[in-house]
Amino acid sequence: MTVLNPLQVKAYRNEGIREAKNDRIDALLIVKVLKFGDYKKSDLPEEDILALRQLTGLRSDLVRMTSSLKLKVIAIFDQVFPEYKTLFYDMFATTSQALLQEAVLPEEVVAISTEKLTKLLDRASRGRQGEKEAKHIKKVAEQSIGVTIALDAFALSLKILLTQITHLEEQIQNLDKEIYQRVTLQQTTLTTIPGVGKTTAGTILAEAGNFDRFAKDKDGAEKLVALAGIDPKIKQSGILKGKTKMSKRGSPYLRQALRQAAFVAACGVRKDPMFAAIYDKQVILRKHFEVALSHVENKMLHVIYSLLKNNKDYIPNI
């Protein structure tokens, strides 16, 4: 069985000028690719890797959905209770969520007795917040400048959105448990790389698929970079050279996971000396943050390639 890359088939559509599309034309395009195209057969991953791809991909989608819902919640609070985001370091932290289960509007917060609010904060924060914070929250709610019309609609919207967020986060936790177990069975050394936890390692393994196709290739590391879509997209004609950008033709899941890992390794609290040095060098050269981080991502993929090929732990090369 041969699995063709849809982008290769789509490229053949441009040989005509009509841009027509139907089942018959699609079938003819596939025949042309098979007869004349410079294509390569796609390797189907093993069952355990395929399962990991399904789980990590779903997790990434749910995280994206959760982020979108949180933005909607923030937008509503900016209208009905704009001061709320100043009360907690994170509106969706545990203590804040405990309060939001009781009240979402300023008038609802004011209606809670100081004693009840104090107990709620104390229990949710494990003793870090108490009566002082409760009085401050009530005072801020009393002085809120939020809108005072259609509050029932805003309140219902907030409660529905917050319920959806809670549900999605529970499902993400369930996926995390399953992903952790499957990554542990893989006995990978990727988690020795700073910034690469088991979820990120699972995504890398899942998106790389059958790694033998990279390991047996002399340009395997560069092809792994291309798979992530962070390889340069070059546009040049004669002496004219366009601006170089990322191709972003690879796996968006791999690219997203890699970006998070690179940021932690280069800019995090426990940053790695090698990756931090690569990032700092680009900053000194006045490169944009994204450009500097892309250099870290590129280096990290080469490290990932080496670890997967040799099955060794990561050791920073300073």
Image (tube, grey):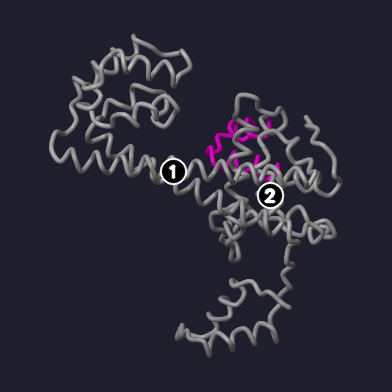
The prevailing secondary structure element of the residues shown in magenta is helix
Percent position of residue 234, x then y: 60, 59
In depth, the one of 160 and 241 nearer the eye is 160
Q: Which residues are magenta?
A: 277-300
Taking the view exactly as shown, the residue that stands out farthest to the left is 149
4 sits to left or right of 290: right
Q: Amino acid at mark 2?
A: Ile
Q: Secondary structure at mark 1?
A: helix
In depth, the one of 96 and 113 nearer the eye is 113
For the residues labelled 2 and 1, say whether their Cβ atoms are less than 8 Å apart: no
Instruction: Classify the position of the N terminus by image quarter.
Output: bottom right
Q: Amino acid at mark 1?
A: Ser
Is the residue 178 above or below the residue 23 in the image?
Answer: above
The residue labelled by disc 2 is 204
17 sits to left or right of 192: left
Percent position of residue 138, x then y: 25, 17
Percent position of residue 4, x then y: 66, 74
The residue labelled by disc 1 is 67
Pointer 1 local density, CA inside 10 Å: few below 14, some 14–19, many at least 20 = few
Which badge, 2 or 1, comes first in the chain's sequence? Answer: 1
